[in-house]
Image (spheres, rainbow, N blue to C red):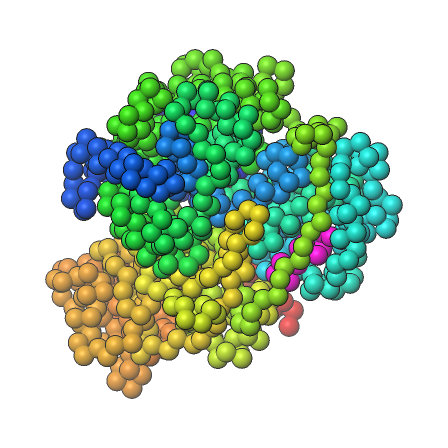
Amino acid sequence: MKPTRTTCPYCGVGCGLLATPDGTIKADPGHPANFGRLCSKGAALGETLGLEGRLLVPRINGVERSWDAALDLVADGFSEAVAAHGPDSVAFYVSGQILTEDYYVANKLMKGFIGAANIDTNSRLCMASSVAGHKRAFGSDTVPGNYEDFEQADVVVLVGSNLAWCHPVLFQRLMAAKAARPEMKLVVIDPRQTATAKEGDLHLAIAPDGDGALFNGLLAEIAAKGAVDEAYVNAHVNGFEAALTAARAQDVANTGLKADEIAAFYDLWINAEKVVTVYSQGVNQSVCGTDKVNAIINCHLATGRIGKPGAGPFSVTGQPNAMGGREVGGLANMLACHLDIEDADHRALVQDHWQSPTICTKPGLKAVELFKACARGDIKALWIIGTNPAVSLPDADFVRAAIKTVPFCVVSDVVETDTTMLADVILPATTWGEKTGTVTNSERRISLQKAFLPSPGKARPDWQIICEVACRMGFEAGFNYASVADIFREYAALSGKAAALGKDFDISALAQISDADYADFPPRQWPLAHGRQGGRFFAKGGFYHPDRKAKMLPGQTAPAVLDGIRFNTGRLRDQWHTMTRTGKSARLSQHHSEPFAEIHPADAEELGLNTGGLVQVVPVQPGRQGRVILRVLVTDTVRRGTGFAPMHWSAVNTQGGRINAALRTECDPFSGQPALKGAMVHLRPFVPLWHGFAASRHEMQPGHGHSAVARTDTGWQQALAGQEEVQDWEAKARQVLNLASGDASLLADRGKNTIRVAIYDGDILQGLFFAAPAPLTISRSFCVAKIGTDLPALQALAGAAMQGRPDPGQIVCACFNVGVNTIEAAIRAGANTPPALGRNTGAGTNCGACKPELQALINTHLQTAAE
């Protein structure tokens, strides 16, 4: 089978892949984003292609129906809402995981044919503050640089970015460049000591939201040290004096850093001409995220370190097509091709190009506002496409209730989610590997995601579904596309008209691309105009404000916070969003198989929390409900007074572990982005009557006071805890394990009050269940591995390997399933460097994302040996 060149569906790095229908996935050595590198998630894509759990037939009120019936109902529902209540009574909520062409037609339908701007995207949750900061500074949402800048810089500063876990291939490129040029310095600014921070030459464990004060202080120091590029500022920048005055007035004590740490950072930044400042969600997801973005940009503008090789501010995006969505106007406050809703000339241009009956005249509802409008009853028809807001938005239970309030709700998706459960109509969409279209990565590089699998069941591409609805609403002339390439050509032609009005985004050189050339689309960076191809922006000015100058803006520090623990949420190395794809992979589920909370040791002692126990997370705001239960991980990698929890778990795989149910956050006033890094919570011990662990060949469902289900190589596993008295433990075990039949062996220790149950089909072990008053000390990896084998009951009920039978332990390297016990044994045998461990065990030799953990294990061994 000849491999198909395509693009990874995960983060904004935009890696090229070679994929075949049998599920073989390899990195594309010729793609300029990854050059043959791959992360653990990308390497496991072949394990996620099965049809288990897929939506394959349209459903109306839970009943399978024909496409004609479903599409007619959707078109009628939206048409009737508009006729009765006006265009602003309907809304779309879309996703950075759909393709640019999908985004384009959804935006066109809402803004040009329905006539409202109520279309927003889950990208609002991850990079809206970057968009707002770019527009305020540059006059356009322009990323100035390239990935090459990471490799060419003398100093790379990572701010609020766990690049090693969230953008692993970029981190690999950076580490390779650093190895080639040891004089390169890496600074990591993050309240947590992440895997990325452990690789830094300088880690600044900054106070939450202290970034603005730090970079304002840097601007003041730039001026004090005479490092301002006065020629650049005079020629290309407005607002310097006002920004500097504001910066001098701010107190760097708000950073929570020591004076010598701040001085070391300022010296590195000022004395290196080639500086790239890379920032991500730790900057954006804040009530002052836009101001923090502008504080970073101010320092680059003041020194002229922008748009040059190895120099510039750089926003890395979290989703595969967050950038493509920005380019087609997928946000509620934008038009396609970076045109502005508030500008009458821009609106007229878009309306003329679309030949649409109307055009929106004002910005629509941003994500959080949109669901508040749903709760108020303002939204009569809602269409959610390719995203799971019932999990991903803050105050998730409120969002669930808000969606239920909408009289007519449609969800297009590929699998059952917390959100599809709330829909009146479910439309089955094709997913990655089954559909073709473009995506844009964080460096403005457009690549093709290309189908290499047939469409399963009755699933259809999102663009076709949207166009079918538009035609049924009476808009056939505007949506009668013969192919996805037709949409791309129309979009490219519009970009040329936008460029003629002075906008940055221009791919008009592709406006006449043939179907054959589109099908073989090579990755290329915009602009793609007849006079310019790719490259950087702003080294010689040329900004997009009317006077063609940039603006430096005075920044604000974060407001005071309430009492409680400041909670930070984010991603894990091996998981993605709400696990609709990565959750299908057994090996990706083994690094962290249940939701947890990282708590500082001093806070844990004060609150009565211990590693392995459970903690209840509740919102600070009085009168608000929302209880989350997480496993406790006591660690000094977080600052005192703060905590961290991953955001991936949903009701599909956990009971009580959906962290956003406990987070009530404010939004940045400029970007509308919620402050998901800064919610205030109270933490309380959760003490169940019993703790349990189960492994089964049959699929298990979450339940009880706390539970989390994960795939394994032998079936499923579940960590759980209950507050109910159990009279019949065999019946409880069968219920949890989903094993009604089979022979059960039960071992009860009345003294320790522990229960062990093994269920067999003949000689083959089908399930194991353990329960005790305290967290269990069994080997989970051993229990999981023995499901489906003929292990005798006595050994199975032991819950751990017998002497002489090695247990690999918790998985550290997901690429090659290498466990901590295997790694520690290799270290004791003399493999005292990550390369040596790689040669001995294979760990760290693929994506490299586990190398910080390998080094930490080595360091622990060496320290113990020295003592």
Q: Quadrant of the image for the C terminus?
A: bottom right
Whether residue 144 sits left or right of residue 493 in the image: it is right
Residue at 79 percent of width and 51 percent of height: 245
Above-or-below relation of 22 to 774: above
Across and down, in percent, residue 77 comes to 25, 38
Q: Is residue 761 magenta?
A: no
- The answer to which quarter of the image holds residue 277 is top right
The front one of 456 and 528 is 528
Across and down, in percent, residue 495 comes to 53, 22
Q: Is residue 208 magenta?
A: yes
Say how many tags the image has.
0
Q: Quadrant of the image for the N terminus?
A: top left
Residue at 16 percent of width and 71 percent of height: 731
Residue at 50 percent of width and 78 percent of height: 607
Extreme-bottom residue of the structure:
751
Across and down, in percent, residue 493 comes to 49, 18
Helix, strand or loop for the magenta stretch, by majority: helix
The front one of 81 and 619 is 81
Across and down, in percent, residue 603 comes to 55, 74
Residue 445 seen by the camera: no
Whether residue 498 sits left or right of residue 95 in the image: it is right
Q: Give the range drawn in magenta.
A: 207-216
Residue at 45 percent of width and 41 percent of height: 364
Whether residue 793 sits left or right of residue 253 in the image: it is left
- The answer to which quarter of the image holds residue 748 is bottom left
Whether residue 541 sits left or right of residue 431 in the image: it is right
Above-or-below relation of 340 to 407: above
Above-or-below relation of 439 to 225: above
Residue 569 seen by the camera: yes
